[in-house]
Image: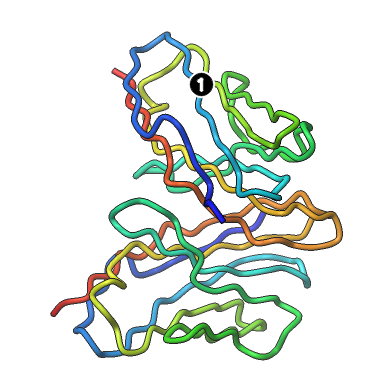
Amino acid sequence: KAGVTQTPRYLIKTRGQQVTLSCSPISGHRSVSWYQQTPGQGLQFLFEYFSETQRNKGNFPGRFSGRQFSNSRSEMNVSTLELGDSALYLCASSLGRERSTDTQYFGPGTRLTVL
Amino acid sequence: AQTVTQSQPEMSVQEAETVTLSCTYDTSESNYYLFWYKQPPSRQMILVIRQEAYKQQNATENRFSVNFQKAAKSFSLKISDSQLGDTAMYFCAFMKPQGGSEKLVFGKGTKLTVNP
């Protein structure tokens, strides 16, 4: 079974631009979570989507948004990019069953550099 | 809010030896899950081991085992017979069940180097 895939793997943008990152979960997984990884702050939870609905949200400004499609693929968008948004953005998928705590499996990440 | 602390930013071990990575966490919850993830230099985060707090038995996965001390809120990872491929960042993570909507809270990580 194919793992979590993320595109693109690398991205360079300038301040003020916006960016869209994509994540395709493992087949059969309905939950997709996004994390930001930086040397200073470590790994921080952005948000989680299940059945096209945001179920959980981390403490990030409104410039960070996401969505999920009917095939469980997810995108995250960052508008008005700032230098501090440079990070590795990781996507993780899980079965997302309501009465179960399912393990999250991670993709390879998208390395975003903001100049 | 839950917090996870990994007190060893870097560690090194000789190939074939055993190493233990420390993790402590803070929570008022009684039911939760703990994980160790490995992130090799290639950046793909890989699940190493998972522990349910309600289980007293420590989880094991081949050369990897944990020492889960619930009262002390401690969750250490032991790697036996270390291999060069074990070189990676290791992250301890906490998850509180929220009816399907869980999020992982990570520690800052421990960089492990296995030397030949």
- A71 or B19: nearer the viewer: A71
Chain label for disc 1 = A
Q: Is residue B32 left or right of residue B105?
A: right
Q: How is the image coloured?
A: rainbow
Residue B31 percent coordinates (x, y):
77, 71
Q: Where does label 1 land, which residue? A: A20
x, y percentage for residue B56? 70, 89
Residue positioned 57% across, 56% down in the render: A1
Occupied quadrant, residue B50 = bottom right
- Looking at the image, residue B34 sits to the left or right of residue B40; the answer is right
> Which amino acid lies under the numbered mark 1 shown in the image of this protein?
Thr
- The image quarter containing residue A9 is top left
Horizontally, residue B9 falls left or right of residue B47, namely left
Judged left or right of residue B28, residue B6 is left
Instruction: Kindly indicate the quadrant of the structure image that contains residue B85.
Output: bottom left
Identify the residue at horizontal 61%, vertical 56% (top origin). A104
In the picture shown, does residue A60 fall above or below A48?
above
- The residue lying toward the viewer, choosing from A27 and B5, is A27
Please give the name of the residue rendered at 58% of the width and 38% of the height, measured from the top-left corner.
A24
Mark 1 Cα-neighbour bin, 10 Å: few <14, some 14–19, many ≥20: some
**Position above or below: A52 against A93:** above
- Of B26 and B68, nearer the camera is B68
Q: Relative to A106, is B87 above or below?
A: below
The x, y position of residue B76, in whole percent, is 48, 79
Residue at left 76%, top 80%?
B54
Quarter of the picture holding the C terminus of chain B: bottom left
User: Measured from the top left, where is residue A91 in percent x and y?
Assistant: 54, 42
Identity of the residue furthest to the front in this view: A1
